[in-house]
Image (cartoon, grey):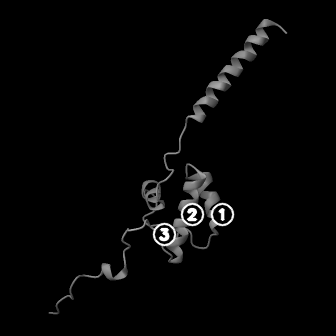
């Protein structure tokens, strides 16, 4: 082999090694965030509410769609898919221990409205 071909091959190997090193140092900024926060940060600009977004869809297909188009990783895509399904099915996602959940009675006014 000629020295020019060896030098070119060495240059290509160095460039590939440098590019793969940058990819290794990348991190998932969405990892560990709750699904409600992921929705608030990424989806609210186009969708006012999570209601109806998972209606009529299987959780797996929703997960694959979110992973391919909108999320930065598989864990955040699964969290979003689970959240959207729980909103449409009426189920609540498990919250952290000690966190207060909003009940329907807390949405009512504190006293009856006086009649005129």
- Residue 114 image position (x, y, % from top left): 16, 90
Does 113 sit above or below residue 43? below
* Label 1 with label 3: CB-CB less than 8 Å: no
Q: How many marks?
A: 3
Residue plotted at (31% across, 79% down): 106
Does 49 sit above or below residue 69? below
* Label 3 with label 2: CB-CB less than 8 Å: no
Which residue is at the far left?
116
Q: Earlier in the sequence, mark 2 or mark 1?
A: 1
- Residue 63 image position (x, y, % from top left): 61, 60
- Between the residue at mark 3 and the residue at mark 2, the CA separation in whole angstroms equals 14 Å
Query: What residue sits right under mark 3 in the picture?
Result: 94
In-image side of 113 versus 10 (left or right) = left
Closest to the camera, between mark 1 and mark 3, is: 3
Quadrant location of the N terminus? top right
- Residue 62 image position (x, y, % from top left): 61, 63
Q: Nearer the viewer, residue 34 or 71?
A: 34
Query: What residue sits right under mark 2 in the picture?
Result: 81
- Between the residue at mark 1 and the residue at mark 3, the CA separation in whole angstroms equals 22 Å
- Between the residue at mark 2 and the residue at mark 1, the CA separation in whole angstroms equals 9 Å
Local SS, label 2: helix
Residue plotted at (62% across, 67% down): 59
Residue 54 picture quarter? bottom right
In the rendering, which numbered label is found on residue 20?
A: none
Query: What residue sits right under mark 1 in the picture?
Result: 61
- Residue 55 image position (x, y, % from top left): 57, 72
Q: Residues within 10 Å of mark 1 (few under 14, many from 20)?
A: few
Q: Residues within 10 Å of mark 3 (few under 14, many from 20)?
A: few
Does 15 sit above or below residue 2? below
């Amino acid at each position: 082999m000629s020295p020019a071909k060896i030098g070119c091959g060495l240059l290509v190997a160095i460039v590939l090694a440098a590019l793969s090193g940058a990819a290794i140092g990348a991190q998932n900024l969405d990892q560990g965030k709750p699904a409600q926060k992921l929705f608030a940060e990424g989806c609210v600009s186009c969708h006012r509410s999570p209601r109806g977004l998972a209606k009529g869809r299987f959780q797996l297909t929703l997960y694959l769609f979110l992973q391919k188009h909108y999320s930065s990783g598989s864990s955040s895509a699964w969290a979003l898919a689970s959240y959207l399904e729980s909103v449409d099915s009426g189920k609540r996602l498990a919250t952290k221990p000690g966190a207060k959940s909003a009940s329907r009675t807390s949405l009512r006014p504190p006293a009856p409205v006086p009649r005129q």
